[in-house]
Image: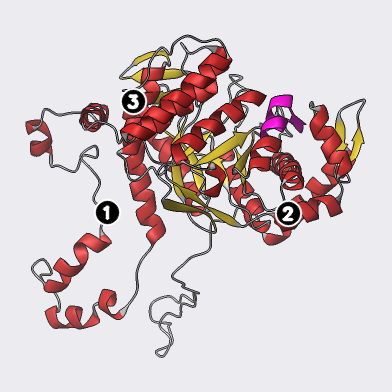
Amino acid sequence: MEIRPPGRSRPEEVCRLEVDITSNPEPLAVLSQDEVREIHEAALDVLAGCGVYVDYPRALEHLAANGADVDFGTGRARLGRPLIERALASCPSSFTLHDRDGGEVLRVGGDEVHFAVSSCAVRFQEGVTVRPSQAEDLVRLARVTDALPEVELQSTAVVAGEAPKNLADSYRLFLVLKNSPKPVITGAFSERGLWDMKSLLDVVSGRDVAEAPCAVFDACPSPSLKWTAISAANVMDAAGTGLPVEFVSMPMPGAATPATLAGSIVVHTAENLSGVVLAQTVRPGGPVVWGGAPVLFDMRYGTTPLSAVEAAMIGAASAQMGKFYRLPTHTYAALSDSKLVDAQAGLETALSGTIAALARVNIIAGVGALDFVGTNSCEKLVVDAEACGFIRRLLRGVEVSPDTLAVDLITELGPGGDYLGQPHTRRWFKKEAHYPGEVIDRLDRNGWEETGSPSARDRAASRVEELLAAGPRGLDPERERRLDEAMRNIMVLYGCGSLPYVGT
C-alpha cells in the first residue's frame, strides 16, 4: 500500500492497495511455517532422546513390538522418526460424529469450528452459590446445552459427587445420553470404565458405536511426557474399538513445561505425537484428535489460568501443529478463570474463544466453565453461547458479490439515500446481521428500565429456566429401557444397589 501526503499523489494512482482477498481467509498463525518445522524437529529430538514415561506394561510391550526403544526398567519409551512418521501417515485427516440416533451431525477436521461444553468440573454454580456438583447438575447442564444450537457438542460436564466411585464415569455418560442426542466428549476414570461406557453407547446406538461414533474419548498425558496406566489403557482400548481418541496435553509453562512458550509447545507436540503412535499402532487408520488444555502457571499466586492470553497462544500454535500433521484439532478455550459470571468472565471467554476460532481449532471445549475449569454454570453456558454466535458470524466473513457491493443501488439513491425501505435491504438484513438472543441487551435505556433493569446474569438465569422448562429430548421408551438395563448390569458388576438420580 502506497500512501502519499495531500497534493503529492500521482493522479493515476491516488492509492494503490494490493491485497490478496479470498473468501476463506487463512487461519490465524502465531508461528511461521519455518517455526512449525523447527518445533516438529525439536519434538522428534525429545521423543528420540528422553522419550516418554509409560506406567503401563502392556503399552510398553506393544510399543517395543512396533519398533520403539523401550527400557522396561525405567518405563521409558523412545520413539524414532520412522515409527512416528508411519503412525502419522495412517491417521485420518477428519472424521464424522453422529448423534445418539445415528444421524451425521458434524465433521471434525479441516477448518471446521465446533464448540463444546467444558468437562469434568467438580463444582456447580447458580448465581453466586457454589456447591459440589451432583448428578442433577449434570442433567441441567445437558438439557441446557441440548437447547443451544451454538454449542454442538455435549460433554460429561461435571462429576456426580454422590455416585459410587466405580460408576463415576459410566453414570455421567448414562445421564447425558438420556437427556440429549448431541454427540458427547467424555472420558473414563479407570481401565474397566471405558468398556462400561462403550456398552452404554452400543445399546443406545443399536449397534457397535464405532460404526457411527457419537462420542469422543479424552485421554490426558500427565505433564510432562508421562502416560499413566489408566490413560495409556484408555488410548489403546478406545483406539482398538475404533472410537475417536482425543489427546489432551496440558502444558504448564514454568512449572511442568519450560517457561518459554516455544518450549511448552515442543512438549505439547511430543506428548500428542506419542499418543498418535500408541493409538495408530493399535489400530492404523483410527480417528484421533490433536488436543490440549494449555495453561499459564501464574507465579504470583500459584494458580493455573486457562484463559491467559499465553494459554490461548499455545492453543493456537498447537492447532497449527495439528494442521501441519493434517489431523483434527482441539483445545480448551471460550472459558474463564473468574469465580462469577461477570465482566472478567465475558472478557476471557470472548478473547480465548475468538483466538481459538480464528486458528480454526476444530473442537473448542470450555463453554460454561469458571474457576480454572473447576466449576460449571448454566448461566455462564447461555452467555457463552451468545459469544459463540458472535464468533461464528465473524468466521463467516464478508460476502463480496455484485449484489452485496450494491453499486447500482448506491448510485441510484445517491448522497443522503434512505436504504431502510429498499427491497435490497429486506433481502439482505437477516442474512448479514447476527441477531443475538435476549441474554444480550440491545434495548435503549428506557426499554431496559421498563423491563426491570436486569443484569446480564439476571437475563441468563431467566433464559436457563425457560430452556429447562421445555423438557429434554429423551429416548424412545424401548431404547430408554435398554439403556437402563445396561446401566443396571454395570451396577451389578460393582455391587451397587441403586443410583442416586436417574435424570427423568
Q: Position of residue 476 (x, y in %)?
A: 32, 36
Q: Please give the label number shown on residue 140.
A: 3
Asked if residue 396 shows in the view, the reply is yes
Q: Amino acid at mark 2?
A: Leu
User: Which residue is most to the bottom?
Assistant: 12
Looking at the rendering, the stretch of residues picked out in magenta corresponds to: 223-234
Left or right of residue 255, residue 14 in this image: left
Mark 2 highlights which residue? Answer: 88
- Other-residue count near label 1 (Cα within 10 Å), few / some / many at <14 / 14–19 / ≥20: few
| Mark 3 and mark 2: Cα distance apart in space | 39 Å
Q: Nearer the viewer, mark 2 or mark 1?
A: 2
Residue at (42, 30) in percent of width and height: 482
Residue at screen point 72% across, 56% down: 90
Q: Examine the rendered structure and indicate whether residue 23 appears above or below residue 222.
A: below
Asked if 173 appears above or below 488 in the picture, the reply is: below
For marks 3 and 1, the one nearer the N-term is 3
The correct choice, above or below, for 395 with respect to 406 in the image is above
Residue 434, label in figure: 1
- In-front residue for pair 482/184: 482
Q: Which of pointers 3 and 2 lies earlier in the amino acid sequence?
A: 2
Q: Secondary structure at mark 3?
A: helix
Tell me the crowding category of disc 2: few under 14, some 14 to 19, or many 20 or more residues within 10 angstroms, Cα based.
Answer: many
Q: Spatial distance from mark 2 to mark 1, Cα to Cα?
A: 39 Å
Magenta includes 439?
A: no
Residue at 63%, 54% in the rendered image: 327
In the picture provided, is 317 more to the left or to the right than 35? Answer: left
Q: Earlier in the sequence, mark 2 or mark 1?
A: 2
Asked if the residues shown at circle 2 and circle 1 are in contact, with their CB atoms under 8 angstroms apart, the answer is: no
Tell me the distance, in whole angstroms, between the alpha carbons under discs 3 and 1: 27 Å
Mark 3–mark 1 contact, CB under 8 Å?
A: no
